[in-house]
Structure formats: structure tokens, C-alpha cells
Image (spheres, rainbow, N blue to C red):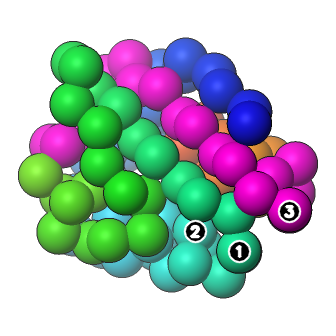
Amino acid sequence: MLVTKLTVKIHRGLQARNTALFVDKASSFTSDVILTKSGISSDGKKIMRVMDLNIKDGDEIMLMVNGCDEHVTFKALKSFLMNQL
């Protein structure tokens, strides 16, 4: 399992379009993806669960990835959240 705390650097955070892109990217991998904000965790592959976290630009979150392709998944999702695409 790979875990990191990071500050989201996406203009407008994970709102509508960005959430859909994140979930699509997370769903393309087999590893489990969990996002946590303010002690509330959500499945990173379920669009409504991610939207419920209301993640904005500058928010500190925790990204957890676990599975057979966790290193690739972790790198791709962390880059997305840090707007380093």
C-alpha cells in the first residue's frame, strides 16, 4: 500500500469535469484507490463519492493506493492531483 499526503493543485479542485477525469483515470487501473479529506474517506473510483469530498484547489488530502499495479497507479494519480500532467 502506498500512502501520501498532498496539497491539491488543480484549478477549481475536483469539481465536475476534473472529478470525472480523475475517476476515469483511477478506474483504468486495477488497484484500489482511496481519497481522504478531513477524516472522511471515499472510493476514488466512484464519481459521487469523490464529489462528496468537495476537494478544492489548495486542500490537503491523503491518497492511498493498494493493488498489483499500485506504483503506476500512485504515480499517475498523484501527478494528476498535483497538476503535473
Provide the residue span drawn in magenta.
53-72
Q: Amino acid at mark 3?
A: Asp
Q: Is residue 11 above or below residue 31?
A: above
As drawn, 43 above or below 12: below
Q: Is residue 65 magenta?
A: yes
C-alpha gap between disc 2 and disc 1: 8 Å
Q: Nearer the viewer, residue 40 or 56?
A: 40
The residue tagged with tag 2: helix, strand or loop? helix
Residue depicted at 38% across the width and 18% down the height: 60
In this view of the protein, can residue 82 be seen by the observer? yes
Quick one: quadrant of the C terminus? bottom right
Q: Nearer the viewer, mark 2 or mark 3?
A: 3
Residue type highlighted by circle 2: Ala
State left or right for residue 63 relative to residue 28: left
- Residue 50 occupies quadrant: bottom left
**Looking at this view, is 58 or 54 the one in front?**
54
Q: Check residue 18 for magenta coloring.
A: no
Element marked by disc 3: loop
Q: CA distance from mark 2 to mark 3?
A: 11 Å
Q: Is residue 58 visible?
A: no
The mark found on residue 69 in the picture is 3
Say which mark, if any, is on residue 26: 2
Which sits in the foreground, 67 or 45?
67
| Residue 27 point in image, percent of width and height | 56, 78
SS state under label 1: loop
Query: Which labelled disc corresponds to residue 30?
Result: 1
The residue under label 1 is which amino acid type? Thr
Examine the image and state in which quarter residue 83 appears.
top right
Q: Is residue 11 left or right of residue 65?
A: left
